[in-house]
Image (tube, rainbow, N blue to C red):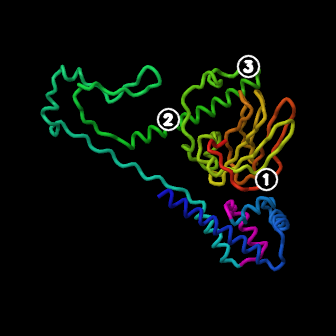
C-alpha cells in the first residue's frame, strides 16, 4: 500500500512540474527563469533562479512550494482553474502514508479451556521448563531452551514486538541527539568529550539506516543517517575554503536540511540554521568528515550550512546541479 501511495505521489510531482513548465513556456512575453524568479520574489515570495529551475525539471523535479505556485500563477496570468489543478497536484504529491491501526489483542484462554494435562504438570516438570530465549552474558545473544524441556505453547504478539522495536529506535535517536549536544558543550568549555563519544566506547548499537520517518518539525535533532530523509537527499549548495568542503543537504520528502563538512579534523564544528532561527551543530570527534542533525526547511533556500575551524569559517553558498545523489548512510 505504501509503495503504491509513493508511486502516486511521485507521478503527481512530475505532473505538477510539467504544468508549471507549460505555464512558463506558453508565456507570450517569453520571460526567462531568472526574470520570473525575480518577479515572484518582488511579490514577497523568496525564490532563486536555481530553485525555480528545480521545480520545472522534467526528470526528478523538486516539489514546488504552494506560495511559489500561487505567485507564479499570478505573474504569468494563467486561468483561475489552473491554480486549482496545480494545488491539487501539490496535495497529492505531498500525501503521507498512513500506518494501519493496531489489531486488538487476542483473548487468553480461560483455565477451563486449558487441557488437563497442561494444568496437572508436576513440580519436577515445571522446574525443567525454560523460557524461549535467555540473554547471554555477552551481547544478549539468544540461547535455545534445553532439548528435554517440555514444549509450552505461547501466544505471539507481533504488534507488541513492532511497537517495542519502534520505541527502542526512537529512544536511541533521542539519546544520540542528547549526547551530541552534551559533547558540543563539553568541547566549548574545554572539557574532554564523554567516553561514549569515542571510537573505543561505541555505546549502544545503532539502528539500521532508513528506520526513522519524520517530516518538518519532527525532523529537528534527528540524525539523517538513521532516517528515510537520506533516500532522496541532495546537496544543493557547497562552499570551499581553508582546505575543507561544506555541503547543505536537503530532503524534499522530509522538508528538512542538514550540514556536512569534509577535510576537517577533531574540534571543527559544522552547523545548520534555518530562517526561523532553529539550529543544530556537531563538534567533530575523530576522522576527517562530520555532519549535523536536521532542522526543518521548506526548501534549501531557507537554510544555511557553515563550518567553523581554527583556520576560518566556511559556508555553503554556491549552487550545484540538482541531480539527486542519495547517500545510503544519510550523511
Say what secondary structure mark 2 lies in. helix
Give the spatial CA distance, label 1 vs label 2: 38 Å
Spot occupied by residue 148 in the image (x, y as percentages of width and height): 23, 25
Cβ atoms under marks 1 and 2 closer than 8 Å? no
Find disc 3 in the rendering and name its residue. 191
Report whether 169 appears left or right of 105: right
* Residue 217, position as x, y percentages in the image: 64, 47
187 relative to 156, above or below: above
Please identify the quarter of the rendering in which residue 9 is found.
bottom right
Q: Which residue is more in the foreground, 74 or 24?
A: 24
Residue segment shown in magenta? 59-78
Q: Residue at x 35, y 41 (%)?
A: 157
Measuring from the top left, give residue 277's x and y in whole percent.
75, 44
**Which mark's residue is nearer the viewer, 1 or 2?**
1
Residue drawn at 59 percent across, 31 percent down? 175
SS state under label 3 = loop
Depth check, mark 1 against mark 3: the one in front is 1
Callout 2: 10 Å neighbours few (<14), some, many (20+)? few
Return the disc, 1 or 3, that comes first in the chain's sequence.
3
Residues at marks 3 and 2, CA–CA distance in whole angstroms: 30 Å
Separation (CA) of disc 1 from disc 3? 38 Å
Label 2 sits on residue = 168
Tag count in the figure?
3
Compared with residue 207, is residue 104 higher up or lower down, i.e. above or below? Answer: below
Q: Which residue is mark 1?
A: 320
The quarter of the picture where the C terminus appears is: top right
Q: Position of residue 54 (x, y in %)?
A: 73, 61
Q: Write down the quadrant of residue 201 in the picture.
A: top right
Is 173 on the left or on the right of 47, as rendered? left
Amino acid at each position: 500500500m505504501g509503495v503504491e501511495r509513493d508511486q502516486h505521489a511521485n507521478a503527481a510531482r512530475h505532473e505538477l512540474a510539467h504544468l508549471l513548465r507549460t505555464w512558463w513556456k506558453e508565456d507570450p512575453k517569453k520571460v526567462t527563469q531568472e526574470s520570473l524568479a525575480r518577479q515572484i520574489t518582488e511579490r514577497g515570495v523568496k525564490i532563486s533562479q536555481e530553485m525555480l529551475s528545480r521545480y520545472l525539471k522534467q526528470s526528478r523535479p523538486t516539489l514546488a512550494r504552494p506560495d511559489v505556485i500561487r505567485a507564479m500563477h499570478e505573474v504569468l496570468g494563467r486561468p483561475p482553474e489552473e491554480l486549482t489543478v496545480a494545488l491539487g497536484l501539490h496535495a497529492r504529491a505531498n500525501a503521507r502514508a498512513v500506518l494501519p491501526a493496531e489489531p486488538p489483542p487476542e483473548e487468553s484462554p480461560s483455565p477451563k479451556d486449558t487441557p488437563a494435562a497442561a494444568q496437572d504438570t508436576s513440580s519436577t516438570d515445571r522446574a525443567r521448563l525454560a523460557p524461549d530465549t535467555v540473554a547471554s552474558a555477552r551481547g544478549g545473544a539468544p540461547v535455545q531452551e534445553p532439548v528435554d524441556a517440555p514444549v509450552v505453547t505461547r501466544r505471539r504478539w507481533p504488534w507488541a514486538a513492532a511497537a517495542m522495536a519502534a520505541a527502542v529506535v526512537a529512544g536511541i535517536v533521542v539519546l544520540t541527539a542528547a549526547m551530541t549536544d552534551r559533547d558540543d558543550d563539553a568541547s566549548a568549555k574545554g572539557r574532554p568529550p564523554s567516553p561514549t563519544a569515542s571510537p573505543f566506547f561505541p555505546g549502544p548499537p545503532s539502528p539500521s539506516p532508513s528506520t526513522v520517518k519524520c517530516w518538518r518539525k519532527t525532523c529537528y535533532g534527528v540524525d539523517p543517517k538513521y532516517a528515510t530523509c537520506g533516500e532522496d537527499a541532495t546537496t544543493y549548495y557547497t562552499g570551499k575554503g581553508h582546505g575543507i568542503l561544506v555541503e547543505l543537504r536537503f530532503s524534499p520528502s522530509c522538508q528538512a536540511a542538514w550540514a556536512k563538512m569534509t577535510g576537517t579534523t577533531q574540534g571543527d564544528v559544522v552547523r545548520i540554521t534555518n530562517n526561523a532561527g532553529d539550529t543544530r551543530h556537531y563538534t567533530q570527534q575523530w576522522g576527517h568528515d562530520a555532519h549535523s542533525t536536521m532542522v526543518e526547511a521548506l526548501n534549501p533556500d531557507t537554510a544555511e550550512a557553515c563550518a567553523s575551524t581554527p583556520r576560518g569559517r566556511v559556508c555553503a553558498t554556491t549552487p550545484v546541479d540538482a541531480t539527486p545523489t542519495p547517500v545510503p548512510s544519510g550523511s
